[in-house]
Amino acid sequence: MDDLKEKAKLFLDLVLSSSRAVAMTGAGISTESGIPDYRSPGTGLWEKMDQSVVSLDGFMKEPSRYYDYSLELYPLRKQAKPNPAHYLLAELEDRNFLRGIITQNVDGLHQDAGSGQVHELHGSLRQTVCLNCSALHSMDEAMQRAAGGQNPPLCEDCAGVLKPNAVFFGETLPTMPWEQSLELSRGADLFIAIGSSLLVSPANALPDIAIRAGSKIIVLNNTPTPFDGESELVVREKIGEFSSVVMELFKA
Ligand SMILES: [Zn+2]
């Protein structure tokens, strides 16, 4: 048995022998879906985008700049489809082997793959929120209006400015998904970290909380993380490819 298949088998054994598994996902799970990582050298979004565009201060000063950038980047996001890693997590949840997903991503690909229990720590780019009345609207609508010349796009109900419902620099995390993520992590007996460097606060607190509550941990990431030493299994393969192998074994 080659290394990949052996690790896939170990991954599946750990999942099947757990009863309260939880997954936490970061940008690395979506790069194979064509969504660039924010920090990777060469392809990282920060190298193309001025960070002030996605800071609360910057947005408040000049919201149209965000939409100017997004008119270019949004089509890429719209084309992105879930990859085998998203589908594997949806399948595990469907068969009651996963209690939920905590995600640092704002791309909505877990929901596209069919996952139901998704806790979005950083909000979602699928929606906008009105800065005046707090109503949620679809990002598609906002982008259509921006493309049609209404930049920034405005709330249909009150004409307030629409801000993407993702957490910008300088904003606090939404309370509800964070509380739910804490609860899931405290109750986990297996914590599966996928595509996250586990360096960014406060999401890096969650695996720590799970471990202290007695959970095992699996790390799937292409670079080392601070939790590798405490993990039952560390996988550096391409996440989508690895997930395909796990899925094959799971369905066999
Ligand atoms: Zn409004």
Image (cartoon, grey):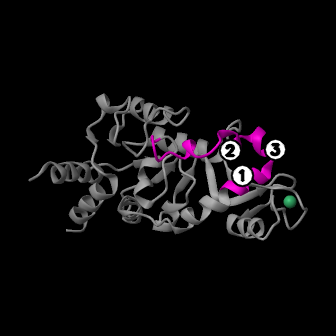
Tell which of 134 and 19 is nearer to you: 134
Amino acid at circle 1: Tyr
Q: Which residue is mark 1?
A: 66
Residue 246, located in which quarter of the rendered image? Answer: bottom left
Task: Give the distance between the C-alpha atoms of the residues marked 3 and 2, in whole angstroms.
Answer: 10 Å
- 63 displayed left or right of 36: right
Are discs 2 and 1 less than 8 Å apart at CB? yes
Task: Give the distance between the C-alpha atoms of the residues marked 1 and 3, in whole angstroms.
Answer: 10 Å
- Name the residue: 81% across, 67% down: 149
User: Which quadrant does ligand 1 occupy?
Assistant: bottom right
Tell which of 44 and 173 is nearer to you: 44
Q: Residues within 10 Å of mark 1 (few under 14, many from 20)?
A: many
Q: Which residue is mark 2?
A: 54
Amino acid at circle 2: Val
Q: Is residue 56 magenta?
A: yes
Secondary structure under the numbered disc 1 in the rendered image: helix
Amino acid at circle 3: Met
- 72 displayed left or right of 248: right
- Name the residue: 45% across, 59% down: 34
Which quadrant is the C terminus positioned in? bottom left
Q: x, y percentage for residue 45?
A: 55, 47
Prevalent SS, magenta region: helix
- 15 displayed left or right of 57: left
Q: x, y percentage for residue 64?
A: 78, 54
Q: x, y percentage for residue 191?
A: 38, 42
Secondary structure under the numbered disc 3 in the rendered image: helix
Q: Which residue is mark 3?
A: 60
- Name the residue: 25% across, 63% down: 250
Read off the magenta span.
Answer: 40-69
Mark 1 or 3: in front is 1
Query: Of marks 3 and 2, which one's residue comes earlier in the chain?
Result: 2
Query: Of marks 2 and 1, which one's residue comes earlier in the chain?
Result: 2
